[in-house]
Amino acid sequence: MNTADLGLPVDVPSTALFTDQYELTMLQAALRAGTAERRSVFEVFTRRLPNGRRYGVVAGTGRVLDAVENFRFDEGVLGFLRERKIVDEQTSKWLADYRFSGDIWGYPEGEVYFPGSPIIRVEGTFAECVLLETVILSILNHDSAIAAAASRMTSAAGGRPLIEMGARRTHELAAVAASRAAYVGGFATTSDLAAGFRYGIPTVGTSAHAFTLLHDSERDAFQAQVATLGRGTTLLVDTYDVAEAVRTAVEVAGPELGAVRIDSGDLLLVAHRVRQQLDELGATATKIVVTSDLDEYAIASLAAAPVDAYGVGTQLVTGSGHPTCSMVYKLVARAESADPAAPLVPVAKKASGGKTSIGGRKWAARRLDEEGVAEAEVIGTGPVPTELADRQLLVQLVKGGEVVAREPLDVPRERHIAARANLPLSATQLSRGEPVIPTEYVQGRSGS
């Protein structure tokens, strides 16, 4: 796996150090205690959705698969660990041969989730599973937060396309992941060329205010852009006077002008005025693109405006106020001994303060009402009820250490559109509320 495909600097050979030190100290102690090889089941879930959110969106699964496949301890990494005395020689030798050989199940990327949903289930020995905790959570917490914000924005846009343009508002590597997650959540294009290169996302972009300011006049700037990019380009019209800029833009490009972009002011009022002016000038097919610190609420407020597309940056790449999903990675079952045939027993943390967990290897299904609309997220251990057998949500992602569920990025994008459409209509409301469907637990008797 080329590390460039992961959004990593080319001099980083693997994802193995995208972890917390205590993963390795736990491994070392378990190796000494003889418990490292016990068969174990870890699950990723969140105890609650971000305040006011009605559903979550699973995103980053494809990146998780790449990260697991690329989780390798080469000599450079091992040398660093030995030099810092993070691991002893026995652990170092064990890590040198590390390859995840277990199974991973999970909600398919683009699916929606709710509190308690076992979004990812990792099965293998304790040693090989525990090492993956931090990198899996790092990816899923970030990407799912961005995808959830993107989903709310695309829903508010009512079918109008959205452009992801937040690269300059976040870390350069996070920007690439955010663009991918936004695409899963329904965005149409990105301004980030790295995201286009790595993930095949359509890219767009024309000019900033600096280009207009560079030239002696706005007309000179428009002429230079049209001469290079053609009459179908998008001209930025709010550097000086919007009405004058629109007039000049149509004079330069003609009625074939592709679009104008508005990046400031009262967008609702300005968009109406610009639409009227364009129509009066004969540029009836010229589109209007608006940007300027948009979020889902601002987009919804422009529903009645003659806007054809939205560009979103800061609010998208920061999760629109919720930059993480608070997902956790918990051991829910483990074998009684290192014997591969030893039965699994449920385990769970018991604590106050809302941090309790439910032990046992879980399945998940979504129950539908008589009209085929989701009415409950059902999670259980033990046998799956017959009536839910064909509604199970988890699919196998890794089998015996081999990735078995790679898919083109358009697949989770379309999956999300379908999953969101299958929720009650109130899921698309931007007003604060509880999860749109409840989570129900069915307690079985087995940890396996």
Image (cartoon, rainbow, N blue to C red):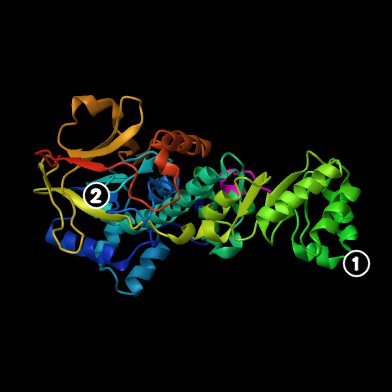
Q: Residue at x 56, y 41 (%)?
A: 158
> Which of disc 1 and disc 2 is earlier in sequence?
2
Residue 72 visible to the viewer = no
Does residue 139 appear to the left or right of 392 in the view shown? right
Does residue 252 appear to the left or right of 71 in the view shown? right
Classified by dominant secondary structure, the portion drawn in magenta counts as loop
- Dot 1 alpha-carbon crowd within 10 angstroms: few under 14, some 14 to 19, many 20 or more: few
Q: Quadrant of residue 75?
A: bottom left
Element under label 1?
loop
The correct choice, above or below, for 423 with respect to 324 in the image is: above
Q: Residue at x 36, y 53 (%)?
A: 136
Residue 427 visible to the viewer = yes
Q: Residue at x 48, y 52 (%)?
A: 149
What's the magenta region?
196-205
Q: Which residue is mark 1?
A: 216
The one of 200 and 364 positioned closer to us in this rendering = 364
Percent coordinates x, y for residue 71 in the rendering:
38, 53
Percent coordinates x, y for residue 352 in the rendering:
15, 63
Name the mark on residue 42.
2
Report if residue 49 lies within the magenta region.
Answer: no
Mark 2 to mark 1: distance in Å?
63 Å
Does residue 165 appear to the left or right of 80 in the view shown? right
Report if residue 200 lies within the magenta region.
Answer: yes
The correct choice, above or below, for 429 with respect to 248 in the image is: above
Q: Residue at x 90, y 50 (%)?
A: 252
Q: Amino acid at mark 1?
A: Asp
The correct choice, above or below, for 372 with respect to 218 in the image is: above
